[in-house]
Image: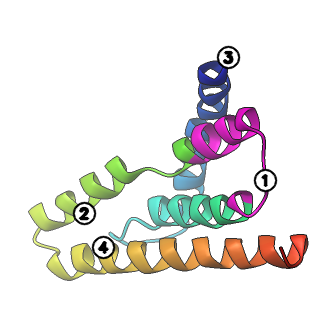
Amino acid sequence: MTVLLAALGAAIGAPLRYLTDRFVQQRHDSKFPWGTHAANATACLLLGVVSGFALPDWARALVATGLLGALSTYSTFGYETVALLRKRERFLAFANVAASLAAGLGALLIGLAAAASLTGPQ
């Protein structure tokens, strides 16, 4: 049953990632992969919030593993970084790596702090 819930979450998260990527990227005239960056940072923020709550295993599989796991995409981040390197866009490739790490970790910490403020001291 847990595997099915993770799959259901992924079935929602993957199209949401695609739509987020297209929505953001269409609004930028840039070679930088803003759409993937936005989807990954959003997933990290939400994962931080979700991680701050005591969820049952089924809910964690559905939301954290399924939905947010599919919303974020390490493989696309890697592919887009290598594509920038192949196009000799070294600065953008480095900026993608640095910004993705900083935004992802920062968003996760902000999400954890938000969850802590909602749940109070433990």
**91 sits left or right of 98 in the view:** left
Cβ atoms at labels 1 and 4 below 8 Å apart: no
Q: Give the mark, 1 or 3, whose residue is nearer the N terminus.
A: 3
Residue beneath the point at 26% across and 77% down: 92
Q: Nearer the viewer, residue 78 or 27?
A: 78
Of the residues tagged 1 and 3, which is closer to the observer?
Answer: 1
Number of marks: 4
CA gap between label 1 and label 4 equals: 32 Å
Please provide percent x and percent y for residue 6.
61, 30
How busy is the neighbourhood of tag 4: few (under 14 within 10 Å), some, or many (20 plus)?
some
Please provide percent x and percent y for residue 114.
78, 76
Q: Which residue is mark 3?
A: 1
Residue 61, quarter of the rendered image: top right
Report the span colored magenta: 50-68
Cβ atoms at labels 3 and 2 below 8 Å apart: no
**Residue 81: assigned label:** 2
Residue 14, quarter of the rendered image: top right
CA gap between label 2 and label 4 equals: 7 Å
Q: Which residue is mark 1?
A: 54
